[in-house]
Amino acid sequence: MYLERLEAALPEVRSRIDRACERSNRQDSGAVVIVGVTKSHTIEALRAAREAGLGVIGENRVREAADKLELVGRLGLEWHMIGHLQRNKVKAALKVFSLIHSVDSLRLAREIAKEASRTERQMPVLVQIDASGEATKSGIGASEGSRAVKEICEIGGIEVIGLMTMAPLTADEGILRNVFRRTCALFERCGQEVEKFEPRYLSMGMTNDYELAIEEGSNMVRLGTALFGERT
Ligand SMILES: *Cc1c(COP(=O)(O)O)cnc(C)c1O
């Protein structure tokens, strides 16, 4: 069931990504990474992801992801953590994930670094940016800018390879574009100003806003509903 659905949805999603790249004069639509968000779905969704050739899946809860990993193994997929990570779950998270999108505070970054150092690892992470201006969103305030990102990059044991943002739930295109544009501007600024920042991934865009996000510079989209259907 998941596989049929996914194989029907993927060509449509890929062509939307291509068109969004064309509209913004980007020649690199193949470089947009699709993270298949399997949270709340069964392990059949992960198997389908592998069968359909999706290389990366995203989960938002450590426990749920660890349980799935135990059931099916890695399946040759990259496992990404996309949800808020509590500091007491860091150790478990490092056993499951190869990239954490959601480093939303200096304290969390330090905890990840501490755990990674224990196993002599360099954990790749993205710094989550709150570009909405709402204090309710988690993430480093975009107005704190490259200075806050720099502080995180200075910590040994983690490797900051990009930024992530979540746009507010709205259909207002102006608001969405503004959030994506501010995050992209910060991404570029960090690339120029922060020595240890590696500007590889700009993770922006979900089912309802990924085309806009790509037009504004995203090269990594996190898609759940568009690929696997509504979550229950
Ligand atoms: C659930 C989730 C997604 C995917 O959401 P859809 O709207 O179903 O595409 C993407 N990013 C994060 C951080 C999420 O929690």
Image: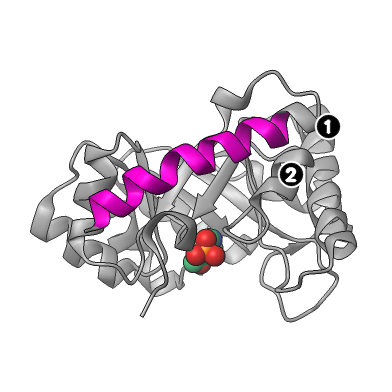
What's the residue at 75%, 37% (across, down)? Answer: 217
Q: Is residue 230 left or right of residue 75?
A: right
- Circles 2, 1 touching at the beta carbon (< 8 Å): yes
Q: Write down the residue under mark 2.
A: 150
Q: Is residue 95 visible?
A: no
Q: Position of residue 20 (x, y in %)?
A: 71, 37
- Magenta span includes 217: no
What's the residue at 38%, 63% (across, down)? Answer: 90
Q: Where 175 falls versus 186 (above or below)?
A: below
User: Which of pointers 2 and 1 lies earlier in the amino acid sequence?
Assistant: 2
| Disc 2 residue type (three-letter) | Lys
Q: Position of residue 153 (x, y in %)?
A: 65, 42
The N terminus sits in image quarter:
bottom left
* View extreme (top): residue: 27
- The stretch in magenta equals 2-21
* View extreme (left): residue: 71
Q: Position of residue 71 (x, y in %)?
A: 9, 59
Q: Position of residue 36 (x, y in %)?
A: 41, 50
Is the C-beta of the residue carrying label 2 under 8 Å from the nearest atom of ligand 1?
Answer: no
Q: Tell which of 230 and 184 is nearer to you.
A: 230
Q: Main secondary structure of the magenta part?
A: helix
Q: Where 59 falls versus 182 (above or below)?
A: below
Q: Is residue 104 left or right of residue 26?
A: left
The C terminus sits in image quarter:
bottom left
Q: Write down the residue under mark 1.
A: 193
Quadrant for residue 187, please give it: top right
| Disc 1 residue type (three-letter) | Glu
What's the residue at 63%, 61% (across, down)? Answer: 208
Q: Secondary structure at mark 2?
A: helix
Q: Where 181 falls versus 105 (above or below)?
A: above
Q: Secondary structure at mark 1?
A: helix
